[in-house]
Image (cartoon, rainbow, N blue to C red):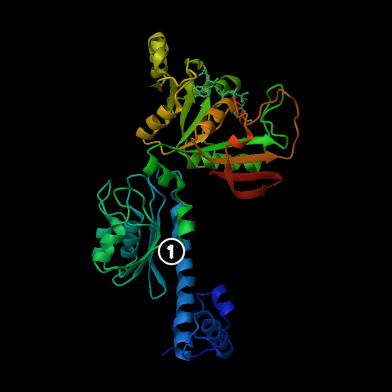
Amino acid sequence: MIPYRRYSPRAVMADPVKFRSRQYSLDGRGFVKVFIALSFRSGRYYLPGEVAGRDNERRLEMAYNKIYMERAIALAKRGVGKVNPNPLVGCVIVKDDEILGEGYHEEYGGLHAERQALADAMKRGNNVYGADMYVTLEPCSHTGKQPPCTEAILDAGIKRVYVGSNDPNPLVAGNGIWQLRMAEVEVVTNCMKDECDALNPVFFHYITENTPYVVYKYAMTMDGKICTAKGESQWISNEKSREKVQTYRNELMGIMVGIETVLADDPSLRCHMDGGRDPIRIICDSQLRIPMESKLVQEAGEVKTYVASLAEHEKQNRQKIRELKDHGVGTLLITADESGKIDLNKLMSQLGKMHIDSILLEGGGTLAWSMINGGYVDEVRAFIAPKVFGGRDALTPVSGKGIEDINLAKTFELQELENIDGDIFARYLKR
Ligand SMILES: NC(=O)c1ccc[n+]([C@@H]2O[C@H](COP(=O)([O-])OP(=O)(O)OC[C@H]3O[C@@H](n4cnc5c(N)ncnc54)[C@H](OP(=O)(O)O)[C@@H]3O)[C@@H](O)[C@H]2O)c1
Protein backbone atom coordinates (compact mmCIF):
# COMPACT_ATOMS: atom_id res chain seq x y z
CA MET A 1 0.00 0.00 0.00
CA ILE A 2 1.44 3.39 -1.01
CA PRO A 3 1.25 5.88 1.88
CA TYR A 4 -0.76 9.02 1.11
CA ARG A 5 0.90 12.45 1.08
CA ARG A 6 0.03 15.73 -0.63
CA TYR A 7 2.19 16.76 -3.56
CA SER A 8 1.89 18.43 -6.94
CA PRO A 9 2.70 16.24 -9.97
CA ARG A 10 4.62 19.18 -11.48
CA ALA A 11 6.85 19.40 -8.40
CA VAL A 12 7.67 15.72 -8.68
CA MET A 13 8.68 16.04 -12.32
CA ALA A 14 10.84 19.06 -11.45
CA ASP A 15 12.65 17.27 -8.62
CA PRO A 16 11.96 13.54 -8.77
CA VAL A 17 14.83 12.66 -6.44
CA LYS A 18 12.98 14.41 -3.61
CA PHE A 19 9.76 12.55 -4.25
CA ARG A 20 10.25 8.82 -4.02
CA SER A 21 7.57 6.55 -5.36
CA ARG A 22 7.34 4.48 -2.20
CA GLN A 23 6.65 7.56 -0.04
CA TYR A 24 4.34 9.69 -2.17
CA SER A 25 1.17 9.17 -4.11
CA LEU A 26 -1.44 11.38 -5.76
CA ASP A 27 -3.52 13.66 -3.58
CA GLY A 28 -7.24 14.11 -4.08
CA ARG A 29 -7.23 16.69 -6.88
CA GLY A 30 -4.37 15.14 -8.83
CA PHE A 31 -6.06 11.79 -8.58
CA VAL A 32 -9.37 13.09 -9.98
CA LYS A 33 -7.57 14.67 -12.96
CA VAL A 34 -5.68 11.49 -13.84
CA PHE A 35 -8.78 9.37 -13.25
CA ILE A 36 -10.87 11.48 -15.68
CA ALA A 37 -8.09 11.66 -18.28
CA LEU A 38 -7.51 7.93 -18.27
CA SER A 39 -11.20 7.13 -18.35
CA PHE A 40 -11.69 9.38 -21.40
CA ARG A 41 -8.66 8.02 -23.19
CA SER A 42 -9.30 4.33 -22.67
CA GLY A 43 -13.09 4.27 -22.60
CA ARG A 44 -13.14 2.35 -19.33
CA TYR A 45 -13.26 3.38 -15.69
CA TYR A 46 -10.23 2.80 -13.51
CA LEU A 47 -10.42 1.88 -9.88
CA PRO A 48 -8.88 4.59 -7.69
CA GLY A 49 -6.09 2.30 -6.46
CA GLU A 50 -5.06 1.39 -10.00
CA VAL A 51 -4.65 5.02 -11.09
CA ALA A 52 -2.88 6.24 -7.98
CA GLY A 53 -0.48 3.35 -7.98
CA ARG A 54 0.26 2.48 -11.60
CA ASP A 55 0.30 5.87 -13.28
CA ASN A 56 2.27 7.54 -10.54
CA GLU A 57 4.84 4.74 -10.37
CA ARG A 58 5.28 4.78 -14.13
CA ARG A 59 5.80 8.54 -14.28
CA LEU A 60 8.30 8.45 -11.48
CA GLU A 61 10.14 5.51 -13.01
CA MET A 62 10.44 7.49 -16.26
CA ALA A 63 11.75 10.51 -14.38
CA TYR A 64 14.34 8.37 -12.60
CA ASN A 65 15.33 6.68 -15.86
CA LYS A 66 15.94 10.11 -17.35
CA ILE A 67 18.17 11.15 -14.47
CA TYR A 68 20.30 8.01 -14.57
CA MET A 69 20.51 7.78 -18.35
CA GLU A 70 21.44 11.46 -18.56
CA ARG A 71 24.24 10.74 -16.11
CA ALA A 72 25.38 7.80 -18.28
CA ILE A 73 25.34 10.07 -21.36
CA ALA A 74 27.41 12.72 -19.55
CA LEU A 75 29.93 10.05 -18.56
CA ALA A 76 30.10 8.70 -22.13
CA LYS A 77 31.06 12.17 -23.42
CA ARG A 78 34.24 12.07 -21.34
CA GLY A 79 35.60 9.58 -23.87
CA VAL A 80 35.48 12.09 -26.78
CA GLY A 81 38.73 11.97 -28.75
CA LYS A 82 40.04 8.93 -26.86
CA VAL A 83 38.05 5.90 -27.97
CA ASN A 84 37.92 6.03 -31.81
CA PRO A 85 37.13 3.90 -33.67
CA ASN A 86 35.13 2.52 -30.74
CA PRO A 87 31.84 4.10 -29.58
CA LEU A 88 31.29 6.50 -26.70
CA VAL A 89 29.53 4.58 -23.91
CA GLY A 90 28.53 5.47 -20.35
CA CYS A 91 27.05 3.30 -17.61
CA VAL A 92 25.43 3.78 -14.20
CA ILE A 93 24.44 1.05 -11.70
CA VAL A 94 21.57 1.88 -9.35
CA LYS A 95 19.81 0.17 -6.47
CA ASP A 96 17.19 1.64 -4.14
CA ASP A 97 17.63 5.02 -5.86
CA GLU A 98 21.32 5.12 -5.02
CA ILE A 99 24.14 5.08 -7.55
CA LEU A 100 26.39 2.15 -6.64
CA GLY A 101 28.89 2.47 -9.47
CA GLU A 102 29.48 4.35 -12.71
CA GLY A 103 31.92 4.31 -15.57
CA TYR A 104 32.56 5.03 -19.22
CA HIS A 105 34.67 3.73 -22.07
CA GLU A 106 37.83 5.70 -21.41
CA GLU A 107 40.26 4.69 -24.14
CA TYR A 108 40.46 2.55 -27.25
CA GLY A 109 41.09 -1.07 -26.23
CA GLY A 110 40.34 -0.29 -22.56
CA LEU A 111 37.59 -1.65 -20.29
CA HIS A 112 34.06 -1.13 -21.58
CA ALA A 113 31.70 1.16 -19.67
CA GLU A 114 29.76 -1.71 -18.04
CA ARG A 115 32.92 -3.30 -16.64
CA GLN A 116 34.18 0.12 -15.52
CA ALA A 117 30.92 0.71 -13.62
CA LEU A 118 31.03 -2.76 -12.03
CA ALA A 119 34.68 -2.22 -11.02
CA ASP A 120 33.76 1.20 -9.60
CA ALA A 121 30.96 -0.34 -7.50
CA MET A 122 33.35 -2.98 -6.21
CA LYS A 123 35.96 -0.33 -5.38
CA ARG A 124 33.32 1.54 -3.38
CA GLY A 125 32.42 -1.70 -1.56
CA ASN A 126 28.90 -1.81 -3.05
CA ASN A 127 27.06 -5.05 -3.73
CA VAL A 128 25.35 -4.77 -7.13
CA TYR A 129 23.36 -8.02 -6.86
CA GLY A 130 19.76 -7.27 -7.90
CA ALA A 131 20.63 -3.74 -9.09
CA ASP A 132 19.56 -1.89 -12.26
CA MET A 133 22.08 -0.91 -14.91
CA TYR A 134 21.69 2.07 -17.26
CA VAL A 135 23.93 1.82 -20.30
CA THR A 136 23.87 4.13 -23.34
CA LEU A 137 24.67 1.34 -25.87
CA GLU A 138 23.62 -2.31 -26.03
CA PRO A 139 26.16 -4.40 -24.07
CA CYS A 140 28.53 -6.36 -26.29
CA SER A 141 28.22 -10.13 -26.50
CA HIS A 142 31.46 -11.00 -28.29
CA THR A 143 35.13 -11.08 -27.43
CA GLY A 144 37.09 -8.23 -28.98
CA LYS A 145 39.88 -6.41 -27.16
CA GLN A 146 37.79 -7.11 -24.04
CA PRO A 147 35.60 -10.10 -23.04
CA PRO A 148 31.81 -9.79 -23.51
CA CYS A 149 30.07 -7.31 -21.21
CA THR A 150 26.99 -9.56 -21.07
CA GLU A 151 29.12 -12.10 -19.13
CA ALA A 152 30.15 -9.49 -16.57
CA ILE A 153 26.53 -8.32 -16.16
CA LEU A 154 25.29 -11.90 -15.57
CA ASP A 155 28.16 -12.74 -13.20
CA ALA A 156 27.37 -9.62 -11.14
CA GLY A 157 23.68 -10.56 -10.79
CA ILE A 158 22.29 -7.36 -12.33
CA LYS A 159 18.49 -7.65 -12.30
CA ARG A 160 17.46 -5.17 -14.98
CA VAL A 161 19.32 -3.36 -17.80
CA TYR A 162 18.09 -0.12 -19.39
CA VAL A 163 19.62 0.23 -22.86
CA GLY A 164 19.77 3.48 -24.88
CA SER A 165 20.97 2.65 -28.42
CA ASN A 166 21.01 -0.67 -30.21
CA ASP A 167 24.48 -1.68 -31.37
CA PRO A 168 24.53 -1.98 -35.20
CA ASN A 169 27.91 -3.76 -35.04
CA PRO A 170 27.17 -7.03 -36.91
CA LEU A 171 29.02 -8.87 -34.12
CA VAL A 172 26.44 -7.60 -31.59
CA ALA A 173 23.26 -6.37 -33.38
CA GLY A 174 20.69 -7.48 -30.80
CA ASN A 175 22.67 -10.46 -29.57
CA GLY A 176 23.69 -8.64 -26.38
CA ILE A 177 20.07 -7.97 -25.48
CA TRP A 178 19.05 -11.51 -26.45
CA GLN A 179 21.75 -13.10 -24.27
CA LEU A 180 20.64 -11.09 -21.25
CA ARG A 181 16.98 -11.90 -21.78
CA MET A 182 17.77 -15.59 -22.21
CA ALA A 183 19.40 -15.45 -18.78
CA GLU A 184 16.20 -13.85 -17.41
CA VAL A 185 17.62 -10.38 -16.96
CA GLU A 186 14.90 -7.81 -17.65
CA VAL A 187 16.02 -5.56 -20.54
CA VAL A 188 14.31 -2.24 -21.23
CA THR A 189 15.34 -0.96 -24.67
CA ASN A 190 15.15 2.50 -26.33
CA CYS A 191 15.62 4.33 -23.04
CA MET A 192 16.35 7.93 -24.16
CA LYS A 193 17.27 6.43 -27.53
CA ASP A 194 17.53 9.71 -29.48
CA GLU A 195 19.89 11.26 -26.95
CA CYS A 196 22.00 8.08 -26.80
CA ASP A 197 22.06 7.74 -30.60
CA ALA A 198 23.33 11.34 -30.81
CA LEU A 199 26.49 10.23 -29.00
CA ASN A 200 27.64 7.93 -31.76
CA PRO A 201 26.89 9.02 -35.36
CA VAL A 202 30.55 8.33 -36.17
CA PHE A 203 30.54 4.78 -34.79
CA PHE A 204 27.19 3.89 -36.35
CA HIS A 205 28.40 5.05 -39.76
CA TYR A 206 31.84 3.48 -39.55
CA ILE A 207 30.76 0.08 -38.25
CA THR A 208 28.18 -0.34 -41.00
CA GLU A 209 29.92 1.39 -43.97
CA ASN A 210 33.60 0.70 -43.15
CA THR A 211 34.42 4.23 -44.33
CA PRO A 212 35.01 7.40 -42.27
CA TYR A 213 32.18 9.71 -41.18
CA VAL A 214 33.02 13.06 -42.80
CA VAL A 215 32.29 16.49 -41.31
CA TYR A 216 32.87 19.53 -43.54
CA LYS A 217 33.65 22.57 -41.44
CA TYR A 218 34.07 26.07 -42.79
CA ALA A 219 33.94 29.68 -41.72
CA MET A 220 32.44 32.23 -44.10
CA THR A 221 31.16 35.78 -44.18
CA MET A 222 27.49 36.79 -44.45
CA ASP A 223 27.97 37.00 -48.22
CA GLY A 224 29.40 33.50 -48.38
CA LYS A 225 33.13 34.18 -48.76
CA ILE A 226 35.92 32.12 -47.18
CA CYS A 227 38.60 34.69 -48.02
CA THR A 228 38.99 38.13 -49.57
CA ALA A 229 39.60 38.58 -53.29
CA LYS A 230 43.32 38.79 -52.38
CA GLY A 231 43.12 35.45 -50.52
CA GLU A 232 43.22 36.69 -46.90
CA SER A 233 41.22 34.53 -44.53
CA GLN A 234 42.63 35.07 -41.03
CA TRP A 235 40.32 35.52 -39.27
CA ILE A 236 36.75 35.29 -40.46
CA SER A 237 35.02 33.84 -37.38
CA ASN A 238 35.48 35.06 -33.81
CA GLU A 239 37.72 33.55 -31.14
CA LYS A 240 34.99 31.51 -29.48
CA SER A 241 34.01 29.91 -32.80
CA ARG A 242 37.63 29.08 -33.49
CA GLU A 243 37.93 27.46 -30.07
CA LYS A 244 34.97 25.27 -30.97
CA VAL A 245 36.77 24.17 -34.13
CA GLN A 246 39.72 23.00 -32.04
CA THR A 247 37.36 20.63 -30.19
CA TYR A 248 36.45 19.10 -33.58
CA ARG A 249 40.10 18.40 -34.26
CA ASN A 250 40.17 16.52 -30.96
CA GLU A 251 36.85 14.77 -31.57
CA LEU A 252 37.43 13.48 -35.12
CA MET A 253 40.23 11.08 -35.93
CA GLY A 254 41.49 12.50 -39.22
CA ILE A 255 41.68 15.90 -40.92
CA MET A 256 41.74 16.39 -44.70
CA VAL A 257 42.62 19.23 -47.08
CA GLY A 258 43.33 19.69 -50.79
CA ILE A 259 46.85 20.51 -51.96
CA GLU A 260 45.92 24.08 -53.01
CA THR A 261 45.08 24.87 -49.38
CA VAL A 262 48.51 23.58 -48.34
CA LEU A 263 50.24 25.66 -51.02
CA ALA A 264 48.25 28.81 -50.12
CA ASP A 265 48.20 28.65 -46.31
CA ASP A 266 50.91 26.20 -45.16
CA PRO A 267 48.62 24.98 -42.33
CA SER A 268 49.74 22.67 -39.52
CA LEU A 269 46.22 21.22 -38.94
CA ARG A 270 47.05 20.37 -35.32
CA CYS A 271 44.76 20.51 -32.31
CA HIS A 272 45.42 23.53 -30.11
CA MET A 273 42.88 22.58 -27.42
CA ASP A 274 44.28 21.92 -23.91
CA GLY A 275 44.84 18.17 -23.60
CA GLY A 276 43.57 17.68 -27.18
CA ARG A 277 44.74 15.05 -29.63
CA ASP A 278 46.21 15.90 -33.04
CA PRO A 279 44.14 14.37 -35.84
CA ILE A 280 45.81 12.22 -38.51
CA ARG A 281 46.51 14.57 -41.45
CA ILE A 282 45.53 13.58 -44.98
CA ILE A 283 46.31 15.69 -48.04
CA CYS A 284 44.79 15.09 -51.47
CA ASP A 285 47.65 15.75 -53.83
CA SER A 286 47.54 13.86 -57.15
CA GLN A 287 50.91 15.08 -58.42
CA LEU A 288 52.75 15.03 -55.08
CA ARG A 289 53.32 18.78 -55.19
CA ILE A 290 53.53 19.12 -51.43
CA PRO A 291 56.63 21.22 -50.53
CA MET A 292 59.20 19.42 -48.38
CA GLU A 293 59.53 22.61 -46.30
CA SER A 294 55.79 22.76 -45.52
CA LYS A 295 54.73 22.46 -41.87
CA LEU A 296 52.81 19.28 -42.68
CA VAL A 297 56.01 17.56 -43.83
CA GLN A 298 58.32 19.11 -41.26
CA GLU A 299 56.06 18.10 -38.34
CA ALA A 300 55.25 14.63 -39.65
CA GLY A 301 57.57 13.06 -37.09
CA GLU A 302 55.19 14.29 -34.38
CA VAL A 303 51.80 13.74 -36.06
CA LYS A 304 50.74 10.95 -38.41
CA THR A 305 50.56 12.41 -41.91
CA TYR A 306 49.55 10.87 -45.23
CA VAL A 307 49.58 12.27 -48.73
CA ALA A 308 47.15 10.64 -51.14
CA SER A 309 48.60 10.74 -54.65
CA LEU A 310 47.95 9.00 -57.95
CA ALA A 311 49.11 5.40 -58.24
CA GLU A 312 49.61 6.07 -61.97
CA HIS A 313 52.42 8.52 -61.11
CA GLU A 314 54.24 6.24 -58.68
CA LYS A 315 57.21 5.62 -60.93
CA GLN A 316 57.96 9.29 -61.62
CA ASN A 317 57.39 10.20 -57.95
CA ARG A 318 59.47 7.42 -56.44
CA GLN A 319 62.25 9.74 -55.22
CA LYS A 320 59.78 12.15 -53.57
CA ILE A 321 57.86 9.28 -51.98
CA ARG A 322 61.15 8.13 -50.42
CA GLU A 323 62.02 11.62 -49.19
CA LEU A 324 58.56 12.02 -47.69
CA LYS A 325 58.90 8.65 -45.98
CA ASP A 326 62.21 9.77 -44.46
CA HIS A 327 60.30 12.69 -42.91
CA GLY A 328 57.59 10.34 -41.60
CA VAL A 329 54.98 11.09 -44.29
CA GLY A 330 53.15 8.05 -45.67
CA THR A 331 52.01 8.05 -49.29
CA LEU A 332 48.68 6.44 -50.16
CA LEU A 333 48.73 5.45 -53.82
CA ILE A 334 45.21 5.70 -55.18
CA THR A 335 44.11 5.30 -58.79
CA ALA A 336 42.53 8.20 -60.67
CA ASP A 337 38.82 8.83 -61.12
CA GLU A 338 37.40 9.77 -64.54
CA SER A 339 38.50 13.40 -64.05
CA GLY A 340 42.10 12.37 -63.41
CA LYS A 341 41.95 13.29 -59.71
CA ILE A 342 42.22 10.95 -56.75
CA ASP A 343 39.33 8.49 -56.71
CA LEU A 344 37.66 9.49 -53.45
CA ASN A 345 35.67 6.27 -53.22
CA LYS A 346 38.91 4.30 -53.14
CA LEU A 347 40.51 6.78 -50.77
CA MET A 348 37.60 6.52 -48.31
CA SER A 349 37.79 2.71 -48.37
CA GLN A 350 41.54 2.87 -47.80
CA LEU A 351 41.12 5.22 -44.83
CA GLY A 352 38.43 2.91 -43.41
CA LYS A 353 40.85 -0.02 -43.64
CA MET A 354 43.35 2.09 -41.70
CA HIS A 355 40.72 2.29 -38.89
CA ILE A 356 40.19 6.02 -39.40
CA ASP A 357 36.53 6.31 -38.41
CA SER A 358 36.04 10.05 -38.95
CA ILE A 359 37.42 12.96 -40.97
CA LEU A 360 37.22 16.70 -40.46
CA LEU A 361 37.28 18.17 -43.96
CA GLU A 362 38.79 21.67 -43.84
CA GLY A 363 38.73 22.66 -47.48
CA GLY A 364 39.30 24.10 -49.86
CA GLY A 365 36.28 24.53 -52.02
CA THR A 366 37.45 22.33 -54.91
CA LEU A 367 37.99 19.27 -52.74
CA ALA A 368 34.81 20.09 -50.78
CA TRP A 369 32.74 19.98 -53.98
CA SER A 370 34.21 16.61 -54.98
CA MET A 371 33.48 15.24 -51.51
CA ILE A 372 29.91 16.60 -51.39
CA ASN A 373 29.19 15.65 -54.99
CA GLY A 374 30.39 12.10 -54.31
CA GLY A 375 28.09 11.87 -51.26
CA TYR A 376 30.97 11.47 -48.77
CA VAL A 377 30.11 14.47 -46.56
CA ASP A 378 27.78 13.31 -43.78
CA GLU A 379 27.64 16.52 -41.79
CA VAL A 380 28.35 20.22 -42.32
CA ARG A 381 29.33 22.59 -39.52
CA ALA A 382 29.25 26.17 -40.77
CA PHE A 383 30.32 29.32 -38.95
CA ILE A 384 28.83 32.48 -40.45
CA ALA A 385 30.51 35.72 -39.37
CA PRO A 386 28.62 39.06 -39.44
CA LYS A 387 30.95 40.49 -42.13
CA VAL A 388 30.80 41.17 -45.86
CA PHE A 389 33.87 40.76 -48.09
CA GLY A 390 32.31 41.05 -51.54
CA GLY A 391 34.50 40.51 -54.58
CA ARG A 392 33.73 38.38 -57.59
CA ASP A 393 37.02 36.50 -57.16
CA ALA A 394 36.71 35.86 -53.43
CA LEU A 395 36.34 32.11 -52.83
CA THR A 396 33.24 30.38 -51.43
CA PRO A 397 33.14 27.22 -49.23
CA VAL A 398 32.24 24.94 -52.13
CA SER A 399 33.45 25.55 -55.68
CA GLY A 400 34.35 22.85 -58.24
CA LYS A 401 32.02 22.32 -61.17
CA GLY A 402 28.77 22.61 -59.22
CA ILE A 403 25.33 21.78 -60.58
CA GLU A 404 23.46 23.35 -63.48
CA ASP A 405 19.98 22.04 -62.76
CA ILE A 406 18.58 23.45 -59.50
CA ASN A 407 16.67 20.23 -58.93
CA LEU A 408 19.98 18.42 -58.54
CA ALA A 409 21.00 20.48 -55.48
CA LYS A 410 22.73 18.53 -52.73
CA THR A 411 20.41 18.75 -49.75
CA PHE A 412 21.04 18.75 -46.02
CA GLU A 413 18.83 19.00 -42.97
CA LEU A 414 19.36 21.66 -40.29
CA GLN A 415 20.07 20.05 -36.90
CA GLU A 416 21.37 22.86 -34.72
CA LEU A 417 21.61 26.66 -34.68
CA GLU A 418 23.60 28.68 -32.18
CA ASN A 419 24.59 32.28 -31.71
CA ILE A 420 28.28 32.32 -30.75
CA ASP A 421 28.97 35.91 -29.73
CA GLY A 422 27.44 37.14 -33.01
CA ASP A 423 28.70 34.35 -35.29
CA ILE A 424 25.98 31.98 -36.42
CA PHE A 425 26.83 28.32 -36.00
CA ALA A 426 24.73 25.93 -38.10
CA ARG A 427 25.01 22.15 -38.15
CA TYR A 428 23.44 20.13 -40.96
CA LEU A 429 23.14 16.42 -41.67
CA LYS A 430 23.14 14.88 -45.14
CA ARG A 431 19.63 13.95 -46.20
N1 LIG B 1 38.69 30.37 -44.95
C1 LIG B 1 38.75 29.08 -44.83
O1 LIG B 1 38.16 28.53 -43.92
C2 LIG B 1 39.56 28.26 -45.83
C3 LIG B 1 39.74 26.90 -45.59
C4 LIG B 1 40.43 26.14 -46.52
C5 LIG B 1 40.95 26.74 -47.65
N2 LIG B 1 40.79 28.06 -47.85
C6 LIG B 1 41.34 28.68 -49.07
O2 LIG B 1 40.94 27.92 -50.19
C7 LIG B 1 41.96 28.01 -51.18
C8 LIG B 1 42.26 26.64 -51.73
O3 LIG B 1 41.06 26.02 -52.17
P1 LIG B 1 40.96 25.41 -53.63
O4 LIG B 1 39.52 25.13 -53.87
O5 LIG B 1 41.65 26.27 -54.59
O6 LIG B 1 41.80 24.06 -53.54
P2 LIG B 1 41.73 22.79 -52.56
O7 LIG B 1 40.38 22.27 -52.48
O8 LIG B 1 42.47 23.11 -51.30
O9 LIG B 1 42.65 21.77 -53.36
C9 LIG B 1 42.18 21.30 -54.60
C10 LIG B 1 43.21 20.39 -55.21
O10 LIG B 1 43.22 19.14 -54.53
C11 LIG B 1 43.67 18.17 -55.44
N3 LIG B 1 42.77 17.03 -55.50
C12 LIG B 1 43.17 15.74 -55.53
N4 LIG B 1 42.14 14.93 -55.67
C13 LIG B 1 41.05 15.68 -55.73
C14 LIG B 1 39.68 15.38 -55.91
N5 LIG B 1 39.24 14.12 -56.02
N6 LIG B 1 38.82 16.38 -55.97
C15 LIG B 1 39.23 17.66 -55.85
N7 LIG B 1 40.51 18.00 -55.67
C16 LIG B 1 41.43 17.02 -55.63
C17 LIG B 1 43.69 18.81 -56.83
O11 LIG B 1 45.03 19.17 -57.13
P3 LIG B 1 45.96 18.09 -57.84
O12 LIG B 1 45.27 17.74 -59.12
O13 LIG B 1 47.26 18.74 -58.02
O14 LIG B 1 45.99 16.94 -56.93
C18 LIG B 1 42.89 20.06 -56.62
O15 LIG B 1 43.23 21.08 -57.50
C19 LIG B 1 43.12 28.68 -50.54
O16 LIG B 1 43.18 30.01 -50.98
C20 LIG B 1 42.82 28.66 -49.08
O17 LIG B 1 43.35 29.77 -48.41
C21 LIG B 1 40.10 28.84 -46.97
Q: Quadrant of the N terminus?
A: bottom left
Q: Quick check: 422 left or right of 270?
A: right
Report the residue at 50% width, 74% height from top.
17
Image location (x, y in percent) of residue 41: 53, 79
Asked if residue 282 is positioned above or below residue 164 in the image, the reply reads above
Residue 331: name its quadrant: top left
Up-down relation of residue 69 to residue 283 (above or below): below
Which residue is pictured at 45% across the width and 54% down the height? 197
Residue farthest along the top direction in this orientation: 316
Query: From the viewer's perspective, is 153 left or right of 305?
Result: left
Residue 56 image offset from top left, x and y in percent: 48, 81
Residue corresponding to mark 1: 191
Compare residues 381 and 297 and report the one nearer the observer: 381
**Residue 130 appears left or right of 272:** left
Q: Where does ligand 1 appear, by image quarter?
A: top right
Q: Is residue 406 above or below residue 414?
A: above
Q: Amino acid at mark 1?
A: Cys
Is any atom of residue 403 visible in this view?
A: yes
